[in-house]
Amino acid sequence: MIKFFVCSLAANLAAKLQEFASTVTVEAEYGDTTVMGTVETLAHHGKNAGNPCPCSYENLFAGNGVEAVGLSHLDLDSLGGCAAVLGTKPDASAFWTLAEFVDLRGPHKLAVSGATPEDTTRLYAWWAWSKDNRFNVPRDGSIADATNYVATAIDALTRIVAGDMEMLAAGERFLKEEWQLNVDSFVEESGGVILRIARGREFVNALYSALDGQVAKAVIAFRTDGAGCTVSFADPILGVSAVELVRKIWGEQAGGHAGIAGNPRGARATMADIIRLRDLVVEAIAEK
């Protein structure tokens, strides 16, 4: 049985994986540090940009005999990679193409993805399930065994792809709730930057529309569950990088890429950090 381990600290994950001879890592990226697998390393952020998304890999791409998989987090993209390692990735190439598109371009670009209504509904169904079934990575750097969660999540994806009516209906309700989330999380818009506060682990970085309908260039979101802070851009801006901006505040352990980045995993952001980040982003995008 393949074991899946998630950790917020690169050194701790690397040490855990050394207990196994045959390993794969999936988005085990921490700033400029990537934890390598002995068989395969699926990484496509930062210095690994340009590599395929984990969800694009075929079933059993790593062959049989993998003992453990290490990750920094669990989302649709990384779970697609996990399913491919297991050989249980649902056969739905167009859906996985959409998952890759959203991971690279952001959920706010869904309208220009070219996806069919069927796959769009599947994606909302996944987001609905994921919202109610989060996997919380320990912030103290300890190792979390995510083996059971990965199996449960892949089962949910399989049912969604197969057309489970209850799950698809939940996706439609999720879409309606997005507007309410826009209203509830909105704090202010200044200089093309929207500041939002997310309760718990709500993801609000895809909400680029202010309440008056104006579309901002960037969103800075503060999460109350662990004082996490993420900045994202609606579209690439020449000469502006999200990860470079967050590293001005939190140093090289802050992770992400040009389009979206945040404070180091396990670290806490203060309100002073958030205001400073907002000012840096406003200045960076001025006259762009």
Image: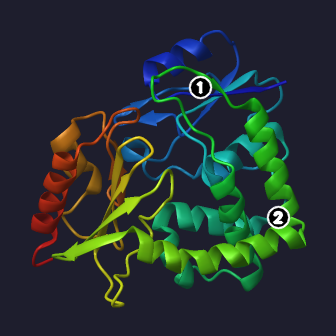
- Alpha-carbon span between mark 2 and mark 1: 30 Å
Q: Which residue is mark 2?
A: 160
Q: Is residue 150 left or right of residue 240?
A: right
Q: Is residue 256 left or right of residue 135?
A: left
User: Which quadrant, please, contains the C terminus?
Assistant: bottom left
Q: Is residue 24 above or below residue 106?
A: above
User: Which quadrant, please, contains the N terminus?
Assistant: top right
Q: Is residue 159 left or right of residue 52?
A: right
| Tag nearer the camera, 2 or 1 | 2
The residue positioned 36% from the left and 73% from the top of the image is 234
The residue positioned 16% from the left and 47% from the top of the image is 272
Q: Is residue 133 above or below residue 170?
A: above
Q: Secondary structure at mark 2?
A: helix
The amino acid on which the numbered mark 1 sits, given as a three-letter code, is Gly
The amino acid on which the numbered mark 2 sits, given as a three-letter code, is Ile
Point out residue 217 in the picture as x, y percentages from the top left corner: 28, 75
The residue positioned 62% from the left and 46% from the top of the image is 78
Point out residue 181 in the picture as x, y percentages from the top left corner: 49, 72
Asked whether the viewer can see residue 133, the reply is: yes
Residue lying at the far top in this picture: please name it. 19
Asked whether the viewer can see residue 257, the reply is: no
Quadrant assignment, res 148: top right
The residue positioned 45% from the left and 45% from the top of the image is 225
Label 2–label 1 contact, CB within 8 A: no
Point out residue 122 in the picture as x, y percentages from the top left corner: 75, 71
> Which one is nearer the viewer's eye here, 41 or 151?
151
Q: Is residue 192 above or below residue 13?
A: below
Q: Which residue is mark 1?
A: 37
Q: Secondary structure at mark 1?
A: loop
